[in-house]
Image (spheres, rainbow, N blue to C red):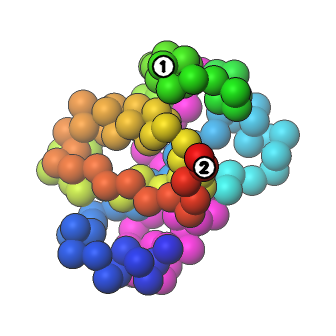
Amino acid sequence: MAAVIRGDPHYHRIDLVVPIPLHPRRRWERGYNQSELLARAVGKELGLLVDNPLIRVRDNPSQTGLTETERKKNVAGIFEVKGGMSGKVILLVDDVMTTGATIEEGARVLKEAGALAVLGAVVAIAP
């Protein structure tokens, strides 16, 4: 992931790497956040700051089996941002993207918090 990001000119000015967060209950059950592990590895490889200003405030149901419209509705309002993102270019990291609804919702709230731009990076795209 870091090699692809390093070679893409769209990703030349990243101020902060942010993982898609899990709800605290889900994080506790799983024992880790796969997106956070990916974000930390990318940040280390690229020498970028990694932080968790994006907070999951609602434990929404799994997206599995939902249509694109249902997925967008399911993730609406699940994130909040702690602190300001004024003028920052954010790299938002997730493990798998199906419709993009989760990354889009994360990007939306980061932009509302003042982010200049939000770029996405995922390991896999599900059909």
Amino acid at circle 1 = Thr
Q: Is residue 93 left or right of residue 47?
A: right
Q: Earlier in the sequence, mark 2 or mark 1?
A: 1
x, y (%) of residue 37? 63, 64
Farthest residue, direction front: 127
- The residue range painted magenta reads 35-58
x, y (%) of residue 106? 41, 37
Q: Which residue is drawn at the image coordinates 34% and 40% (left, top)? A: 107
Mark number displayed over residue 126: 2
Mark number displayed over residue 112: none
Q: Is residue 109 above or below residue 14?
A: above
Amino acid at circle 2 = Ala
Is residue 118 visible in the rendered structure shown here?
yes
SS at circle 1: helix
Mark number displayed over residue 69: 1
SS at circle 2: loop
Considering depth in this image, is 8 or 92 the residue closer to the camera?
A: 8
Q: Quadrant of residue 95?
A: bottom right
Is residue 51 visible in the rendered structure shown here?
no
Q: Is residue 29 above or below residue 89?
A: above
Q: Which residue is drawn at the image coordinates 31% and 55% (left, top)? A: 119
Q: Is residue 70 magenta?
A: no
Q: Alpha-carbon neighbours of circle 2 within 10 Å: few (<14), some, or many (≥20)? A: few
x, y (%) of residue 82? 40, 36
Q: Which residue is drawn at the image coordinates 21% and 75% (left, top)? A: 9
Q: Is residue 54 magenta?
A: yes
Considering depth in this image, is 37 or 71 the residue closer to the camera?
A: 71
Q: Is residue 57 left or right of residue 117?
A: right
Marks 2 and 1 sit apart, C-alpha to C-alpha, by 16 Å
Q: Quadrant of residue 12?
A: bottom left
